[in-house]
Image: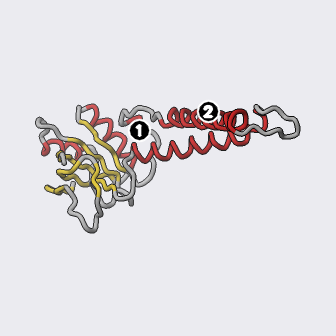
Amino acid sequence: MAKKKFVIGCFDNEDVLFPAVKKVRTAGYKIQDVYTPFPVHGLDHALGMRETSLHTAGFIYGVTGTTTAISCISWIFTKDWPLNIGGKPHFALPAWIPIMFELTVLFAAVGMVLTFCYLCQLAPGVKKHHFHARSTDDTFVMVIECTEKTNTDDLQAFLSNAGALETNIQVAEEGWWLGRYDKDEMPFESTQIVAA
């Protein structure tokens, strides 16, 4: 597993976090992610993240559902098992609209959920490193990826000056692994915890 070094900065307020994100990006550091206890409006734009393509994927899944419904129903009622129902034509498109709608919604919903889980690496047994225990409670955690040229002491001092209440250095697996938190040894080490 590929481990990387990260510098972590913890903030207690989103009003302090936003200017800190801008300062860190302006200084040329690479912010891997910011973990927040609740959704913060505008943080994705401040981090320079592009807009998600999930809605495009949902449209493609919906079109696939509609196409599947029309193809299956028309094949069944016109080729495989044509029935004379009150003299109606075999290709009775208006009668199929409810089924087409339901398959469109089903394909779009299931496809978007599976795509979201894949992109966020969410699945039973999949674990990711938690950079701070309170990131789901009341702490905003900024994770900065270090390179060979990064001076971690200067970066920690920079974060403290930007308003971080706590900084530390962690060596962690950047991706995900399979296992359980209570049974498996987590592939990371924490070092140098410095309170501002």
Q: Position of residue 170 (x, y in %)?
A: 18, 52
Please tell me whether mark 1 sits on a helix, a strand or a loop: helix
Residue 175 to residue 150: above or below: below
* Label 2 secondary element: helix
Q: Which residue is mark 2?
A: 67
Residue at (12, 45) in percent of width and height: 153
Residue highlighted by disc 1: 44
Pointer 1 with pointer 2, Cβ within 8 A: no
Q: Quadrant of the C terminus?
A: bottom left
Categorize mark 2 by other alpha carbons within 10 Å: few (<14), some (14-19), many (20+): some
Please tell me which residue is depicted at 11% across the width and 37% down the height of the picture: 148
Q: How is the image coloured?
A: secondary structure
186 to the left or right of 59:
left
- Nearer-the-camera pick, 146 or 20: 146
Q: Position of residue 137 (x, y in %)?
A: 39, 60
Q: Residues within 10 Å of mark 1 (few under 14, many from 20)?
A: some
Residue placed furthest toward the bottom: 182
Is 111 on the left-hand or right-hand side of 50? right
- Which amino acid is tagged 1? Asp
Instruction: Give the spatial CA distance, label 1 vs label 2.
Output: 35 Å
